[in-house]
Each structure stands twice: as C-alpha cells, then as structure tokens.
Amino acid sequence: MVEVLFALGLVVAVFVGFNIGGSSTGVAFGPAVGSNTLSKLSAAALMTVFALAGGLLVGPAVVESLGSDLVETAFSPLISIVVLFFIGVALFLSNVVGVPASTSMTAVGAIAGLGLAKRTLNGGLMLEIVSWWLVSPIVAFWVSGVIGRYFYPTLVEWFAVSQSEGSLLAMDYSGAIPRPRLGENTTEREFVGTAVVVGIGCYMAFSAGASNVANAVAPLVGNGSLEMYPAIALGGAAIGLGAFTIARRTMDTVGNDLTDLPLVAAIVVATVSSTIVTFLSALGIPASFVIIATMSIVGLGWGRATRTTQLSESVREASTAPVESLAADDAPTVGGETSHSPELRESERGETFREDAPSASDLFEPGTTARVIFLQNVVPSIATVAAYLVFRFLPVA
C-alpha cells in the first residue's frame, strides 16, 4: 500500500508540475511570443532551463515554507496526494480554457482548505498573504498605467525597433571557426532590444521556478516521500513538459488575445511584473505571478488609451526628433496603429489631442481581460472549497 501511495503521489506531482508549466510559461514568455520575439518552441526550452534553475537555487526555502509554516497539519502520503490532486485539477481546468491561473494562489488555497478543515491554519500568515495578493495587482496596474500614459512615447524612442525580415542571427563561416553574426537585416538596436526581452523572460521563468516548483512537490517533501533536490528535479521536468505542450494556449492568451504587444510593451510588462514578484518573494510571500502580469498588461493598455499629446509638444517633438526617433515613434505600440499625419482636435479643456489616439478596446480586449481576471480568482477558490469539503467530511488522514 505504501508503494502504491508513493507511485500515485509521483504521478499527481508530475500532473501538477505539468499544469504549472502550462500556466507559468504563458506569463513569462507570452509577451515575447506575442511580439514575435521568440517562437513558442524556444520559449518552452528557455522556460524549462530557467524554471529548473530557480527551483534548485531558490526553491528549497519555498518548499519548506509551504510544507510546514502555513498549516500545522502533518502531510501524510494520502493528504499530500489529495492536496496535489486539487491543485492539479484546478490548474488543468484553467489551462484547458487557455487562461493562465495563479499557481501560488491555487496551491495556497488547497493547503488553506486543509488547514481550515483540520483547524490548523496559520491565520496571521494567511491574512498577510491575502493582503499582498490584493495590493500587488493594483500596484502593477497603476505603475504600468503611469508608464503608458506619461513615459511610453519616450520609451518608444529609446527602445522600440522595427523587427526586420529574416533571422535575428546568422552563422559566419568565413573564418576557421564558425561564429554567429547579426542577420542580414538585423540592426544592433534590434538585437539589444530582443536580448532585453528574452533576458527578462528568462528572469521571470527563474522566479516562477523558484516559487512554483514548490507547489508541485512540497507535500511530498513534507511527508518524507522524496528528498529535496530529487523532488525539485522532478517538478522542474514536469514544468518543462507542460511548457512544451499545454502552454501554447496560455501564451496565445497573454501574448495576443489580451493585447497586441510590441517589443517595448513586452519590456515594460516583464520589468514591472518581475520586479514586484521579486520584492514579494524577498518578503516570503508566494506571489500571484499571473495576476500581476495580467494587470500590468491591462494597466499599460489603459495608460496608452488615456494618453494625450498637446499641440505644442507635438510640434516640438516633430521639429527636434532625429530621424531614428521618428521612425521609432511610428513603430507599433500597444495595439495601436501608427499614422504619419495625425489630425488634431481641441478638447473642452483647450488641450490638443491626436485624432487617431487609440481607444481602450484597441489596446486590450475588455472581454478577454474580464474572463482572465474572473477565472484567475475562481480557480484558486475551486481548489480551496474542494479541499475543505474533502478534509472536513471525509476520513482522509
């Protein structure tokens, strides 16, 4: 019986890791894929490597936290399997509909359901976690909104590039040793911008692995079924499997359906999201990575939609901007199409706006956004309620 429970625990842990890979890959690399900076296959490979690295280097502390601090109930083999099962099923449902659910919220919800049923939940820690879950998406929205409204045009001039035809890099075989070089149409600016987006995505994958690998294996480590590093390796491999398979739908949702993200927008979203998640991780809070990134995307789109440009500013920019900057400003921004001769109109306040200023619906899809936010809160609730009912009314020990 012990061997059967151990084998079943491994299967359920892999199932959870598989769904974590499907959810987290869309968050980490959805902006890069949506801006055509990376292919889905390349994103999956990078997700696998850096999520495993994050799990091995930072993950052990998170595994111990989830396995002992949140609830006082000991994780028996059967309890571990049931908790992991609810986490996996909830995440699987979200991945099926193409919405990247919050892995940390789902895992904490399932464990909290256990604690409520057994009356062993650490209420103070749970309140602190939930408080940060409420605050962090609001911070992400407003920071990104301010950037979109007041600083995005400047960022476009600094960083935006028109992605060229052909491959980013090519091999130079003229010397004794083949070496990579810029593609035929690739500029140095394009290469640097692409490297920044990919680098930030890799950092996000590292952060996701640091916190989310624990969600798949913490109960098994807590009950002694697996040692720490073999368990993390198992979780990392399962995340990689999900990244190469089910993550394709969540990458489409984050990278394409929520908003049309060009290179500059991908940099903004990734930077804001990863910075907030890193800050929360330093405080020991399991961050809701998915919701933070989603609200960053929505906030950036809202900021762009509400941005105004006064006539004097437009004339000054047009007369002083170098040719390269003007070309960059014509580069596509968050969902908006460019216009080389925008008409201007007077508002009731006497300010001058671009007639072709993008509307909110041009910058992010309200329907998709509402569906994403709704399901991101429903999925953890399903795990919490299901775990509570099972551990409260069934003889699971």
Image (cartoon, rainbow, N blue to C red):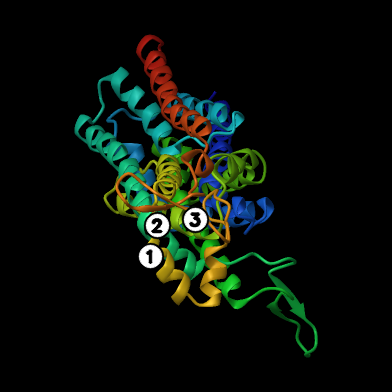
Mark 3 / mark 2, whichever is N-terminal:
3
Q: Nearer the viewer, residue 318 or 53?
A: 318
Q: Which of 128 and 185 is in front in this view?
A: 185
Disc 3 designates what residue? 265
Q: How crowded is mark 2: few (under 14 residues within 10 Å), some or many (20 or more)?
A: some
State which mark lies toward you, 3 or 2.
2
Q: Which of marks 3 and 1 is nearer the N terminus?
A: 3
Q: Where is residue 244 in the image (x, y as percent from the top left)?
A: 66, 46
Q: What residue type is labelled 3?
A: Ala
- SS for callout 2: loop
Q: Which of 212 and 275 is in front in this view?
A: 275
Q: Residue at x 40, y 71 (%)?
A: 316
Characterize the local packing of mark 1: few (<14), some (14-19) or many (20 or more) Cα atoms within 10 angstroms: few
Please report contact status of discs 3 and 1: CB closer than 8 Å, yes or no.
no
Q: For the residue labelled by badge 1, is the local secondary structure a helix, a strand or a loop?
A: helix
Q: What residue type is labelled 2?
A: Thr
- The residue that appears at 57% across and 53% down in the rendered structure is 47
Q: Image quadrant of residue 341? A: bottom right
Question: Which numbered marker is on residue 313?
Answer: 1
> The residue tagged with tag 3: helix, strand or loop?
helix
The N terminus, quarter of image: top right
- The x and y percentages for residue 298 are 44, 42
Characterize the local packing of mark 3: few (<14), some (14-19) or many (20 or more) Cα atoms within 10 angstroms.
Answer: many
Give how far across and how far down residue 176 sits, in percent.
78, 90
Mark 2 highlights which residue?
Answer: 309
Which quarter of the picture shows residue 14? top right
